[in-house]
Structure formats: C-alpha cells, structure tokens
Image (spheres, grey):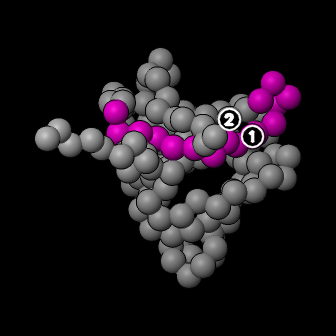
Amino acid sequence: MMEVEDPILNMIKADILYTGADGHSHFKEGFVTDDLITDVRHLHFKETAAKASYDWHTAPRTQYVITLKGSLEFTTSLGKTFILQTGEVLIATDTTGKGHKWKLIGTDPWLRAYVAFEENEPINFQEHL
C-alpha cells in the first residue's frame, strides 16, 4: 500500500514582510513547504538578549529568518503587528521604504538563523487561505 503524506504536515508557519506600492511595510501569514529547494548565498546565526528591541529598519537583503528560540512582536510601518515564535520563519523582503521594528516578548533570548538567497530565486511562501 502506498503511503500518502498529509500536506499540512509538510508546511512550516511563515510570515512574509514586504514593501507595498505605498512604500509601507506589510505582512502576510502563510507557510513555507518542504518541496522547494532554494540555492542560498550565505547563512549566519545571531543571538539577542531577552527584552531587546530594534527600532525602524528595512531588511538588509531578501532573506529567511528562522527563529530557533524566542518570541517577538513585529510592527509594520502602518502599525500592524504579528508574533513570531520558535520554529517559525520570517521571509524579509521589505528592503525599501520605512521598514519594520521588533521587540522580544517573554524571557528567552532570540536565537535565529539568517539565510540569504539570490534575488532571482523563487520565494518559498504560500499565503494562508
């Protein structure tokens, strides 16, 4: 008997940050899937102490930010917020405009991996319906 995989199990929660035509940052909730392989330019890791925050900034490049530990609240330039938690992916594409800011919530530091990829690589993101 052939095993059929549950498509929901092959998705990881992700949020994408992008710059709209209005010059403001926006976000969509969705998923990355395990069926697209992306060539990466570089990978690096970073840790930020609990309770830290980072004021308005744009993404330095198009990149995946994979949260290994911690929870934080992102705010777009229009004041919309979303929470990113351990095991979730942020796809940062808002490289222009006012950008976004974030603050850590809870008592854990933020451990993350930045995965930058070439601009012409497809972005592995499916919007939550």
Tags 1 and 2 touching, CB below 8 Å = yes
Q: Percent from the top left, x then y, of residue 17?
A: 65, 41
The magenta segment is 20-35
Q: Percent from the top left, x then y, of residue 22?
A: 85, 28
- Residue 72 part of the magenta-drawn span: no
Amino acid at the residue labelled 1:
His
Q: Percent from the top left, x then y, of residue 32?
A: 46, 41
User: 21 and 5: which one is in front?
Assistant: 5
Q: Is residue 59 visible?
A: no
Residue lying furthest bottom in this view?
107
Amino acid at the residue labelled 2:
Tyr
Label 1: state its secondary structure: strand
Q: Percent from the top left, x then y, of residue 31?
A: 51, 43
Q: Is residue 128 left or right of residue 89?
A: right
Picture quadrant of residue 87:
bottom left
Q: Is residue 74 left or right of residue 63?
A: right
| Crowd tier of the residue under label 1, counting other residues whose Cα lies within 10 Å: few below 14, some 14–19, many 20 or above | many
User: 30 and 19: which one is in front?
Assistant: 30
Residue 105's place in the image compared with 77, above or below, is below
Query: Which residue: 54% across, 35% down?
Result: 126
Query: Which residue: 51% across, 77% down?
Result: 108
Q: Is residue 44 left or right of residue 5?
A: right
Residue 22's place in the image compared with 59, above or below, is above
Residue that badge 1 annotates: 26
User: 125 and 40: which one is in front?
Assistant: 125
Query: Which residue: 58% across, 59% down?
Result: 84
Q: Mark 1 or 2 closer to N-term?
A: 2
Q: Is residue 104 visible?
A: yes
Label 2: state its secondary structure: strand
Residue that badge 2 annotates: 18
